[in-house]
Image: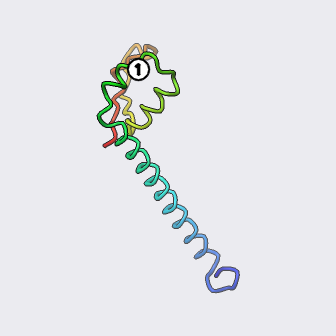
Amino acid sequence: MWASGEISREEWLSLKRSLGGRAQDMEADVARLDRLEALRRLAGTGRAIADGWATMNAEQRRAILHTAIDYVVVLQAEPPRQVFRPERLQPVWMG
């Protein structure tokens, strides 16, 4: 439509931004649905996962965590700031 002169360049750019944002949102929704489906497949296997955790490699563990955790909240550090404190990391589980 822009090439034929039906809409201005500004209108075309505005539509492009709008559609680009919507496409990204839809891609994120699809990815979330894929993760939810993977999480459903894991449902009821908690004991098996816990029993096998020690023998899993890092990639297997990462895949499980990626499926089960939506995001992680990192709490503010208190002095001394260079010390790792796992309690500052609060996972928000998928669901």
Which one is in front, 81 or 92?
Answer: 92
Is 11 drawn above or below residue 32 in the view shown? below
- Expressed as whole percent of the image width and height from the top left, the position of residue 74 reads 38, 30
- Expressed as whole percent of the image width and height from the top left, the position of residue 62 reads 48, 29
Name, please, the residue furthest toward the right: 3
Density class for disc 1 (Cα within 10 Å; few <14, some 14-19, many ≥20) is few
Residue at screen point 37% across, 36% down: 68
- Expressed as whole percent of the image width and height from the top left, the position of residue 43 reads 31, 37
Answer with the quarter of the image where residue 53 lies: top left
Residue at screen point 51% across, 67% down: 18
Residue at screen point 34% across, 41% down: 94
Placement of the N terminus among the 4 image quadrants: bottom right
Q: How is colour applied across the structure in the image?
A: rainbow
Which one is in front, 23 or 5?
Answer: 23
Q: Secondary structure at mark 1?
A: helix
Which one is in front, 29 or 85?
Answer: 29
Is 18 drawn above or below residue 6 in the view shown? above
Left or right, residue 91 beside residue 6 = left
Q: Which residue is mark 1?
A: 53
Residue at screen point 41% across, 51% down: 33
| Kind of residue at badge 1 | Trp
Answer with the quarter of the image where residue 91 lies: top left
Is 84 drawn above or below residue 70 in the view shown? above
Is 23 drawn above or below residue 10 in the view shown? above
Which one is in front, 29 or 86?
Answer: 29
Q: Tally the marks.
A: 1
